[in-house]
Image (cartoon, rainbow, N blue to C red):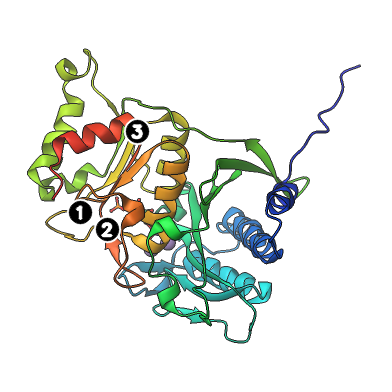
Amino acid sequence: MERVNTEIVTLTRFLTEEQAKHKEATGDFTLLCHALQFSFKSIAYYIRRATLINLTGLAGSSNITGDDQKKLDVIGNDIFIAAMRSSGKCAVLVSEEEENAILFSEHEGARYAVACDPIDGSSNLDAGVSVGTIFGIHKLAEGSKGTKEDLLKPGTELIAAGFTMYGASAQLVITMKEGTVNGFTMDTSLGEFILTHPDMRIPKKRAIYSVNEGNSHYWADETKAYFESLKNPELNGGKPYSARYIGSMVADAYRTLLYGGVFAYPADKKSPKGKLRILYECAPMAMVFENAGGQALNSRMERMMEVVPESIHDKSGIFMGSYDEIEKVKSFHKSK
Ligand code: AHG
Ligand code: MN
Ligand code: MN
Ligand code: MN
């Protein structure tokens, strides 16, 4: 008789086993992650039904970084704030959709600071393209009650980061400080995230590049030269690189993590500081990519994880991907 697989690791079990590895753990981080998990399940529910219940389209407002807010940006933001508040373990929250940091001062004992992009790739929502939620978790500084300064730290101080992509299925990717990268797939019949991609490692190289070439007129000369070199068959064993660009960072990141290659959103003459935000896009993704064996740099060829954001919505250029592909990026860009 065919035996069924009873060795199913849910995210809940994974977090419990992670906690057991740390004798000093209070369980607060685990409870915070359960609140995160709930927010992903709840956002996925609304994303899947958006077209049916008139939740596509614009909310009629814009956020501090100038993005037009989609209805689902606002709903995803509300869901995430409610989940963090009710967890009782988050002291301060920065969201792409909130101008200022939200301080949950009612939670005396809360020891965590969270940064989030509730809906990443929202410009693609109405077209049914995969979008996602990106998060980064910092621990409060000793004696801090939770202020935005607890988030103005380099990615090297993140204790956990990751994202959930709402694609054909909901895929959660999470990594802890100095840990492995683990991927979970939502089983809607169980209502559980199931460990499907343990210890994800990004391929060392892959001839795929992912960038919005519509910005190439504004790129620095060395950036133009780098991408042109990828298209030259003579420089790549007779076959040019393939171009793959979805326009949702989570989807481009997830493909790059699985297949290898390079994803880039370079700073350019139009956006000298780049477009992507450090706290809730560049730093969390950099942690995932480094922990999977890849690299992530800013446009000055500095390690993305060491960049200290100047403000909670500070931006940066970014190149991230396979280890060898980023070595090639460096060879074209002099460190400034
Ligand atoms: P968000 O939807 O959270 O504002 O993020 C959009 C970002 C990111 O998802 C993507 O990589 C990038 O914007 C795409 O920008 P372009 O449309 O300029 O290529
Ligand atoms: Mn936006
Ligand atoms: Mn985003
Ligand atoms: Mn967003």
Residue at 63% from the left image edge and 84% from the top image edge: 108
Residue at 41% from the left image edge and 52% from the top image edge: 124
Tell me how far mark 1 sits from mark 2, CA to CA: 7 Å
Which amino acid type is shown beneath numbered disc 3? Tyr
Residue at 51% from the left image edge and 79% from the top image edge: 146
Disc 1 target residue: 267
Q: Are marks 1 and 2 in contact (CB under 8 Å)?
A: yes
Q: Is residue 228 above or below residue 249?
A: above
Disc 3 target residue: 323
Q: Is residue 87 above or below residue 322?
A: below
Q: Is residue 180 above or below residue 42?
A: above
Q: Earlier along the polypeptide chain: callout 2 or callout 3?
A: 2
Q: Earlier along the polypeptide chain: callout 1 or callout 2?
A: 1
Q: Are marks 3 and 1 in contact (CB under 8 Å)?
A: no
Left or right: 62 as drawn, with respect to 106: left
Residue at 68% from the left image edge and 49% from the top image edge: 18
The quadrant where ligand 1 appears is bottom left
Left or right: 143 as drawn, with respect to 107: left
Question: Is the shortest distance between ligand 1 and the CB of mark 1 under 8 Å?
Answer: no
Which amino acid type is shown beneath numbered disc 1? Ala
Q: Quadrant of residue 273?
A: bottom left
Tell me how far mark 3 sits from mark 1, CA to CA: 21 Å
Q: Is residue 305 above or below residue 263?
A: below
Question: Is the shortest distance between ligand 1 and the CB of mark 3 under 8 Å?
Answer: no
Disc 2 target residue: 316
Q: Residues within 10 Å of mark 2 (few under 14, many from 20)?
A: many
Dot in front, 3 or 1: 3
Q: Quadrant of the N terminus?
A: top right
Expressed as whole percent of the image width and height from the top left, the position of residue 288 reads 46, 46
Label 2 secondary element? strand
Q: Earlier along the polypeptide chain: callout 3 or callout 1?
A: 1
